[in-house]
Image (cartoon, coloured by chain):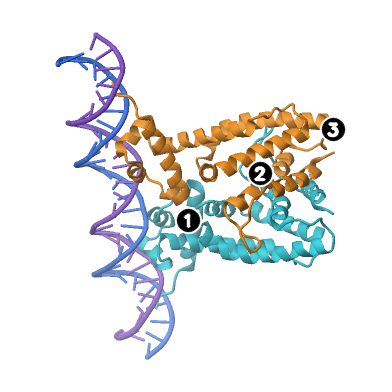
Chain colours: A cyan, B orange, C blue, D purple
Amino acid sequence: MRYRDEHKELLVKERAIEMIVREGLDGFSMQKLAKEAGVSPATLYIYYKDKEDLLIQLGYEEATRLTTTILKNFDPNMKFEEGMRVQWRNRADYWLENPVRASFLEQLRHSPLRTRVFEALDTEFVASMGRFLHNAIDNKEIKPLTKEAFWSVAYAPLYNLIRFHTEGISLAGEPFQFSEEIMWQTFALVMKALKA
Amino acid sequence: MRYRDEHKELLVKERAIEMIVREGLDGFSMQKLAKEAGVSPATLYIYYKDKEDLLIQLGYEEATRLTTTILKNFDPNMKFEEGMRVQWRNRADYWLENPVRASFLEQLRHSPLRTRVFEALDTEFVASMGRFLHNAIDNKEIKPLTKEAFWSVAYAPLYNLIRFHTEGISLAGEPFQFSEEIMWQTFALVMKALKA
DNA sequence: AATATAAATGAATGTTCGTTCATTTATTAT
DNA sequence: ATAATAAATGAACGAACATTCATTTATATT
């Protein structure tokens, strides 16, 4: 029998993500994707059941990569400051090294497919971080906080910083340049807010 | 001559926002909108040049409402803590009272139309907040910060908190219930991070 | 009552959409 | 070589798409 051309399969994925980032979820179509990937439309239906299936599979795959990256070198039993530092490092790495993929995920996050793509992964992920938070409070490394307050203060500032960089937003004259320095300065502010 | 039916015009806007929030930007179409608003498709083209024009006009209008709400009772010359408190109050009010409209704006923010909808408003808005920050640093109410670090620490946590509430995200057993209490607790954390 | 005018319409345009299918192609196992 | 099999295809389907247009409707002015 004939084997599936993996190069072709990868190309389809790559072009799909590109197109969605470039033209939005509404600018994305199966026929355009087929043309851009140099493939027959029918081929897409060998790889995927339908358009929605394609989006969900692509989203799930990329969300998994994100989760894996963020948890690298991280252990919920780490000391609080060290764990936080690893998390900031990992999250920054993912966003800075995969801006297109990150933007694709962001579009899915704000679309009605959100639940089906992220729910399972998020749940598992949040459980791990929950233990991390619980330990830190028990050891009196940080003041008692609800999970929601912790998550909101702990990472949202970093994401915002990265967004300024990635979207080329300019608050002063020239577009903001992300740097290790400003990242760790902001990290210090966040640690100050959280510490017991 | 015949006058434009303003009730009809408003209904079109409302249904458009509803549909985009419900089905995403890719689930939105002019023909469906016409049907849901009880209007001929041709009527939409009296109100708007084309589909893109509709989205941009709707987005701009809603972004203006957001900006206006956020700046209510705010003055860049306020004392830092008071100004921050007003900003948190206003931002929370907008998101909690207009969840559907806010979600509509969020979809546009993460779409390729972003620049055309928000750029002008954002620029003006950021200028006002820039003065506020500048004053606070001059008066030594907060430590010296870049604009990007300030924005990232000052409001991102609030938005995150509201997102948990609006999207019904559950970190513990039951879905998170936003409350004044947790809002001001989080506010206190942020103020602690920023204060000189 | 008649006229002028812009709003509003339903039907139609050509285009693009998601998806299917009969057929061909490439590869493994015989 | 041949048979078997899944990959891959191009052409085609009806449905839904954005948009247009000739016509009708409602209202303000004469």
Place of residue B159 in the rendered image (x, y in percent of width and height, measured from the top left): 64, 46
Is A126 or B52 nearer to us in this picture?
Answer: A126
Q: What element carries label 2?
A: helix
Chain under numbered label 1: A
Place of residue D3 in the rendered image (x, y in percent of width and height, measured from the top left): 30, 86
Question: Which amino acid type is shown beneath numbered disc 3?
Answer: Lys
- Are tags 1 and 2 found on a single chain? yes
Residue at image position (39%, 65%) is A45
Marker disc for residue A165? 2
Question: Which amino acid type is shown beneath numbered disc 1?
Answer: Ala
Residue A77, quarter of picture: bottom right
Place of residue A177 in the rendered image (x, y in percent of width and height, measured from the top left): 70, 41
Place of residue A166 in the rendered image (x, y in percent of width and height, measured from the top left): 63, 45
Is B11 or A175 nearer to us in this picture?
Answer: B11
Camera-nearest label, 3 or 2 = 3
Asked if disc 1 and disc 3 are in contact, CB closer than 8 Å, the reply is: no
Distance of mark 3 from mark 2, alpha carbons?
Answer: 28 Å
- Image quarter hosting the N terminus of chain A: bottom left
Asked if disc 1 and disc 2 are in contact, CB closer than 8 Å, the reply is: no
Marker disc for residue A16? 1
Asked if disc 3 and disc 2 are in contact, CB closer than 8 Å, the reply is: no
How many numbered marks, from 0 up? 3
Badge 1 density bin: few <14, some 14–19, many ≥20, Cα 10 Å: many
Badge 2 density bin: few <14, some 14–19, many ≥20, Cα 10 Å: some
- On the image, numbered disc 3 is attached to which residue? B140
Marker disc for residue A82? none
Task: Please report whichever mark, 1 or 2, sits nearer to the chain's N-terminal start.
Answer: 1
Residue at image position (72%, 56%) is A146
Is A7 or C18 nearer to us in this picture?
Answer: C18
